[in-house]
Amino acid sequence: MANNAEEMIRKLQICAPYTDEPFPFKSRVLVGPTRSGEIRRYFRRKARLNLDKIADSRLSTWEKTLTISQFISDHIPHDNQKKPIKWLNAIQLWEYAQRVPTGFNCRWHAILLSELLLSIDIKNRFVTCMPEDKDDQDCHVVNLVWLPEMNKWAMIDCDQREYVTGPEGVPLSLEEMRTELIAGGELNICQYSGPDCREFLQGYWAKNLYWFSVHMTYGYDLEGLRIIPDTYVHLVPPGYDIPARHRRGGDKITTNAAAFWQG
C-alpha cells in the first residue's frame, strides 16, 4: 500500500476503543407500499428495470442487490453533479441522469440504490464514511444491505462499482472492513465492472473509515426537501470531536459501535 494508506491505518489503530454507552436512538421504518409500487412501476416503464421480476426471482438478497447496483453503475457514471435538485429520491435522480448524462456523485448514487432496494423490501441504509482529518472535506457514501440468508450487513458501492469480501468470499460490512484494516490486513476489493481502481480504493477506504453517519430511518425522501421525521446519528471514536460543518440541529453522536450498526 502507499505510505498515505499506511498512515491512515495507523490512525485507525491508535483510536480509543468504542464504548457501550447508552444508545437511545431507535430506527424507524417508513416504507409504504404505495410509494414502493410507484417506484417499481416508474422504473419498469421509464428505465426498463423490472424490479418486480428481480424481487420474485430465486436470486439471493445479495444477488438481487448486485443486479440493481450494476444497473445503476452501467447507466450513471461517477461525476460531481452539475445542477442542484430539490427532491433527492429515486425517480428525480433517474430523471436528472437522463437530462445530465455525465452522472453524479457517490451520495446521489447511494440514495438511488437505497430507494430501489427498499422498493422490493431489501433492508438497507446509506452511510457517510468520514476521514479523521477535519480539514479534509472529501468523504464517501455507500450502502449497507441486510442479508437475511447470512444474518449480516454487507457494503455495496454502486458509485465505484465495488464491494469487499472476506477470505471465504462473504461480503463484508463497513465495520468488518474497518476491523480488517486495524488488524493489519488488506481489503479484498471486488470490482464488478469498470477500470481497475483497487489500489486507489485501498487507500481511500483506509482514509474514510474513521467515523460514520446514518439516518435512523428506513424510508424514502430522506434528503433534499424532507417530509418525514428522522434522527441523524454519528459514530465516532471516543475523544473525537466532529467538525462543526457536519453538525446539524437534532443530530446525535455516539461511541457505541455495536448499537449504532444494529440500529
Image (cartoon, rainbow, N blue to C red):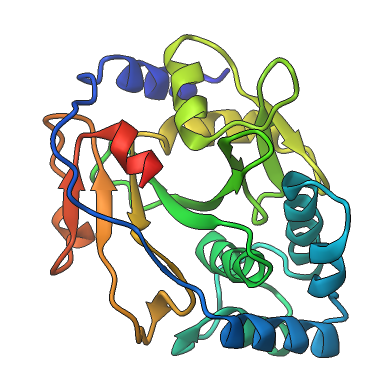
Q: How many marks?
A: 0
* Residue at image coords 26%, 49%: 234
Q: Residue furthest top?
A: 184
Residue 180 % position (x, y):
51, 18
Residue 249 % position (x, y):
13, 69
On screen, residue 257 versus residue 175, left or right, reads left
* Residue at image coords 17%, 54%: 252
Query: As rendered, which of 63 and 56 lies closer to the eye?
Result: 56
Image quadrant where residue 115 sits: bottom right
User: Which quadrant is home to the N terminus?
Assistant: top right
On screen, residue 196 versus residue 211, left or right, reads right
* Residue at image coords 74%, 65%: 72
* Residue at image coords 49%, 36%: 174
Q: Is residue 96 visible?
A: no
Q: Is residue 152 above or below residue 218?
A: above
Residue 199 % position (x, y):
66, 28
Q: Is residue 191 above or below residue 40?
A: above
Query: As rendered, which of 257 and 240 lies closer to the eye?
Result: 257
Q: Is residue 136 visible?
A: yes
Residue 130 % position (x, y):
36, 44
